[in-house]
Image: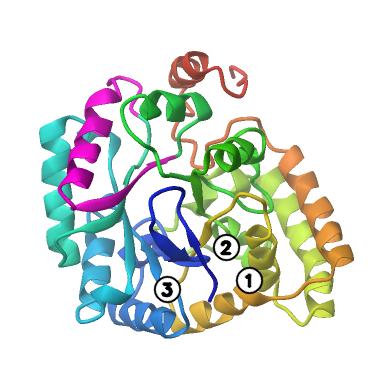
Amino acid sequence: MEKRTLGDSGVEVSVLGLGTWPMGGEWWGGTDDEESIRTIHRALELGVTLFDTAEAYAAGHAEEVLGKALVGRRDRAIIADKVVPDRFERAQILEAFERSCQRLQTDMIDVYFLHWPNIDLPISEAIETLEDLRAQGRIRAIGVSNYTSKERDAASQYGRIDVLQPPYNMFWRFIEGDQLPYSQDHNIGIMAYSSLAQGLLTGTLSRDTAFAEGDKRPTTVLFQPEAYARSLDAVDALRAIAERNGLTVAQLAIAWILSRPGLSTALVGARTVAEIEENVPGATAQVSAEDMAEADSLTRAVFESLPRVPDMFQNWDNWELQRRRYERTGQLPVTAP
């Protein structure tokens, strides 16, 4: 599988990475640890080297599963991990980092992210702490996840930001406004998550889908009734395009995102061997220029219909929080309810 370097960090990753959030078992409606481990092993066999996790994924359970799976295989994997935003003081970050290492059964983490911005704390202490960990050889690259452009710029005043981790897929394209061009100009890596739009771009969901108990996707922006219906209509149209190119919808969506300028790697969530085996061929799929343009156009229409708040999880759905965050950063406009 093709590999690309994350910015100036020297960290080389496969263009397709495996996201382990669904393997935590929380938020996504349950999982099977043994099958998750088999999935990680199969991903390695297929050339996937990047594995993304976070302490927030089921209170560290996803980290534990990944750690077990990589016993005897750690040298073949690049681990990306994240610290939650309410632990951005120096002592808190160091404690969180050590606990993550214990769960992962490793003494270093390749790429370490600030998971979300904290609008109540200065960013300086967090970034300076990460730079200290880099100097000690405990991490190799520093990243920020779900940060706006101005939040990224603020972080960059205190250290080198090597990689951004934003949501990005055919339906969710907010980073195309300024994040992608800026990252290209300044050699910052982009590690996209939700590359299959939380499963919408797998082609397996329908209007009759009954989500399992504990599956919280219906609370997110793309799964609200109007957006969900438009997305499903677009997926139906994508099926014909995918079939013309001998692909599944998921493989077409992966081929699309890996063709985007400035992208380093795309994360896909998989809980079974069958899912990762379907996803990986998308990294080398060949799609005609005409078909790719058609797929791009019909899915862009879904994006353009979305509310202009670039948080698919509605973590900032409280109007006062939105106002404080977005007025501070000068980012996309929001509308009070």
Instruction: From the image, tell me which residue sits under label 1.
Output: 204
Q: Is residue 130 covered in magenta? A: yes
Residue at the far right in the pictured view: 290
Q: Amino acid at mark 2?
A: Gly
Residue 243: percent from left, percent from top: 80, 79
Q: Is residue 49 covered in magenta? A: no
Instruction: From the image, tell me which residue sits under label 3.
Output: 271
Number of disc labels: 3
Element type at mark 2: helix
Element type at mark 3: loop
Tell whether label 1 touches label 2 (CB within 8 Å): yes
Q: Amino acid at mark 1?
A: Thr
Q: Which numbered marker is on residue 199?
A: 2
Residue 5: percent from left, percent from top: 47, 58
Magenta-highlighted residues: 118-145
Going by the image, does 299 lie left or right of 159? right
